[in-house]
Structure formats: structure tokens, C-alpha cells
Amino acid sequence: MTSFIVASPQSCIGCRTCEVACALEHVTPGAEFNPRLKVMRLDNLSVPVMCHQCENAPCVGACPTGALSMGAERIEADAARCIGCQSCAVACPFGAIAIEVNAGQPPVIIKCDLCGDRDRGPACVDVCPTAALSKMTEKQLNDLQKQRNIATAALLTL
């Protein structure tokens, strides 16, 4: 199972601090401002949307070159294999992947990588002023499922 970021729309204030932190964490010389998540705002609700690190990821299946693959914790991106066809972007049900194509340069895959090289974990989670973001691991998900099963069983015995 992969890890993923959980966003709480009840806690999110739409400040976009997570977008800035993400873009700064992934900045490269000459690159554009490319956060791997996007804060979506409605009238009275805002929430960051990013790669869900799907277990049966449509983007992985859609990639004709294997530039995207299932890793132990997340969907791995190998930009060296990317041909810029955008198939992964079309296949993603969350709109959470993009391919940046600039003339004379290789394509760049823009998707959440859970800040895998960062010791403190995802930058977006680290900087969120309202703790609206958290990283969910397999153990945490299993613990949550057990808690919900116990709560459901308790309701059924009433």
C-alpha cells in the first residue's frame, strides 16, 4: 500500500501556504512555479488537491513508456522515460498530474512525490498553519479502520 496526504476541508483556510512550500521544495533553476498540489476554492470551502498515490493508479497504466511506476510508498516518476504525451494527465481522475513541456528540454513530470527526499516528510504537511494536511501511512489507515469497525460494532449492539 502507498502512503498519501489527507486534506481536511473543515480545517483548510485556503491560504495556499502548502502550494508555496511545495513549489519551493521542488524548485529547479529556470523552472516555473510548479507546486505538486493545488488549493481548490469554492464559496465557503477550500481544500488542497494532490496525487492520491492510488494503489491501482490509472496514470501508471496509461503511461506507454513506464515513466510512472508503483513504488513502495508512492507512485514513482522517472522523467528520463517521459515522452510528454500527457496520457497520465488525462487518466488521472483527480487532475493531480501535469507534464511541463518546453522546447528543447525534456518533459518534466509534475506530481506529488510526498517529498520523498525530505527528512521531515512532505513540506505541505509541515507548513500548514491549521494542520489541515496529514500524511496517512498504511499503519495509520489500518488503525483508523479498526477504530471505525469497533465504533460500528458498538452501534450495532445498542
Image (spheres, rainbow, N blue to C red):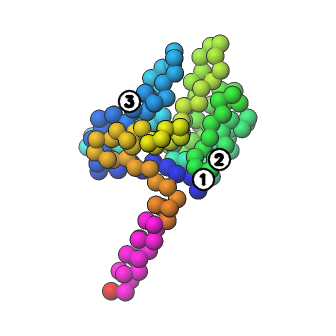
Nearer the observer, 35 or 59: 35
Residue kind at label 1, given as amino acid type: Glu
Q: Secondary structure at mark 2?
A: strand
Nearer the observer, 15 or 58: 15
Residue 101 x %, y %: 60, 21
Residue tagged 3: 20
Distance from the alpha carbon under mark 1 to that under mark 3: 27 Å
Distance from the alpha carbon under mark 3 to that under mark 2: 27 Å
Residue tagged 1: 55
Q: Is residue 50 shown above or below 143?
A: above
The answer to whether the residue labelled 1 contacts the one labelled 3, judged by CB atoms less than 8 Å apart, is no
Q: On the rendered image, what quadrant is the N terminus found in?
A: bottom right
Q: Nearer the viewer, mark 2 or mark 1?
A: 2
Q: Residue furthest bottom?
A: 157
Q: Residue at x 37, y 36 (%)?
A: 18
User: Mark 2: few, some, or many residues within 10 Å (few <14, many ≥20)?
Assistant: some
Q: Earlier in the sequence, mark 1 or mark 3?
A: 3
Q: Which residues are magenta?
A: 143-157
Q: Residue at x 28, y 45 (%)?
A: 130
Residue 70's mark? 2
Nearer the observer, 36 or 41: 36
The answer to whether the residue labelled 3 contacts the one labelled 2, judged by CB atoms less than 8 Å apart, is no
Magenta-drawn stretch contains 62: no
Is the magenta region chiefly helix, strand or loop? helix
The answer to whether the residue labelled 2 contacts the one labelled 1, judged by CB atoms less than 8 Å apart, is yes
Q: Residue at x 29, y 35 (%)?
A: 15
Q: On the rendered image, what quadrant is the C terminus found in?
A: bottom left
Q: Secondary structure at mark 3?
A: helix
